[in-house]
Image (tube, rainbow, N blue to C red):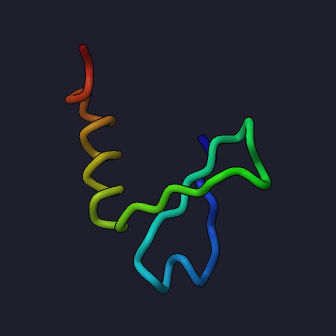
C-alpha cells in the first residue's frame, strides 16, 4: 500500500491510499483523516494483532 500525499487531499480531509502493485493507474481508496489516524494509532499500539 502506498500513501498518496497531496495538498488537495489534505485540504479535503481525506487520506488517499493505492496498492503499489497497481500504481500509478490503480484504484485509490480514501479514508477520512480522523479514521486513518485511529487506525494507525491502533496499529502502533498492537491492538490489531490476531
Q: Quadrant of the C terminus?
A: top left
Q: Residue furthest left?
A: 47
| Image quarter of residue 25 | bottom right
Q: Name the residue located 59 percent from the left edge and 57 percent from the top edge.
A: 28
- Asked if residue 47 lies left or right of residue 19, the reply is left
- Asked if residue 41 lies left or right of residue 26, the reply is left
Picture coordinates of residue 8, whole percent (x, y): 59, 83
Picture coordinates of residue 34, whole percent (x, y): 28, 65
Q: Is residue 42 above or below residue 13?
A: above
Q: Name the residue located 71 percent from the left edge and 41 percent from the top edge.
A: 20
Near-viewer residue (38 or 18):
18
Q: Quadrant of the N terminus?
A: top right
Picture coordinates of residue 40, whole percent (x, y): 35, 46
Q: Which residue lies furthest to the top in this view?
A: 50
Q: Is residue 48 above or below residue 32?
A: above
Q: Name the residue located 70 percent from the left edge and 50 percent from the top edge.
A: 26
Near-viewer residue (36 or 19):
19
Q: Name the residue located 63 percent from the left edge and 60 percent from the top edge.
A: 4
Near-viewer residue (15 or 40):
15
Q: Is residue 12 above or below residue 27?
A: below
| Image quarter of residue 17 | bottom right
Q: Is residue 21 above or below residue 2?
A: above
Picture coordinates of residue 42, whole percent (x, y): 24, 39
> How many numbered discs sit on the rendered protein?
0
Amino acid at each position: 500500500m502506498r500513501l498518496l500525499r497531496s495538498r488537495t487531499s489534505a485540504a479535503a480531509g481525506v487520506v488517499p491510499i493505492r496498492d503499489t502493485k497497481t500504481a500509478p493507474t490503480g484504484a485509490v481508496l480514501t479514508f477520512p483523516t480522523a479514521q486513518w489516524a485511529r487506525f494507525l494509532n491502533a496499529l502502533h499500539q498492537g491492538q490489531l494483532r490476531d
